[in-house]
Image (cartoon, grey):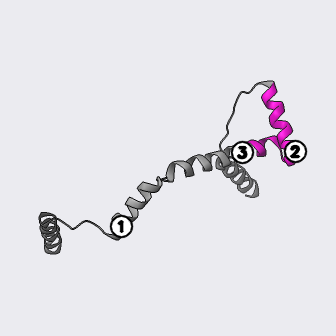
Amino acid sequence: MKTSTLESKKKQARQRYGRLEARVTPELKELLIDAATLRGVTLSDFIINSARDVAVQTIEEHQLVRLTREASIQFAKALLRPARSHPRRLAAARRYREAKRTR
């Protein structure tokens, strides 16, 4: 029984991690090894941490909206003083709420 439990734990541990491979020039490999050594981590840890940092930064840059000063002012004004709703839009919203209530 213990053997099967140990085998299933090993199998679960193997399934938790995916494998990545990359072919690099010898010069790049040496550069990465030197950098990892300076940080006091393994080459694998250095590559994983570096890739994660760049991935997080890339995602954050694409999720962040940057506005010019003029656009920021226009946006703030629109939030502080929203345009008046058109009567047809108000009537449509009223009809929608009524239809929702009757369901």
The magenta stretch spans residue 29: yes
Residue 17 showing in the rendered view: no
What amino acid type is highlighted by mark number 3?
Ser
User: How many C-alpha atoms fall within 10 Å of the one at disc 3: few (<14), some, or many (≥20)?
Assistant: few
Judging from the image, what secondary structure is the residue with disc 1 in? Answer: helix
What amino acid type is highlighted by mark number 1?
Leu
Question: Disc 1 vs disc 3: which is toward the camera?
Answer: 1
The magenta stretch spans residue 97: no
In this picture, residue 95 sits left or right of residue 1: left
Distance between the Cα atoms at labels 1 and 3? 40 Å
Image quadrant where one finds the N terminus: bottom right
Q: What stretch is highlighted in magenta?
A: 27-48
Q: What residue would you read off at disc 3?
A: 50
Tell me the chief SS of the magenta region.
helix
> Quadrant location of residue 74?
bottom left
Q: Which of marks 2 and 1 is nearer the N terminus?
A: 2
Front residue of 52/21: it is: 52
Residue 50 showing in the rendered view: yes
Name which residue lies at 84% across and 37% down. 33
Q: Which of marks 2 and 3 is nearer the N terminus?
A: 2
> Quadrant location of residue 51?
top right
Mark drawn on residue 79: 1
What amino acid type is highlighted by mark number 2?
Leu
User: How many C-alpha atoms fall within 10 Å of the one at disc 1: few (<14), some, or many (≥20)?
Assistant: few
Name which residue lies at 72% across and 50% down. 10
Picture coordinates of residue 50 (x, y %)?
A: 72, 45
Picture coordinates of residue 19 (x, y %)?
A: 67, 39
Q: What residue would you read off at disc 2?
A: 38
Mark drawn on residue 26: none
Q: Which of marks 1 and 3 is nearer the N terminus?
A: 3
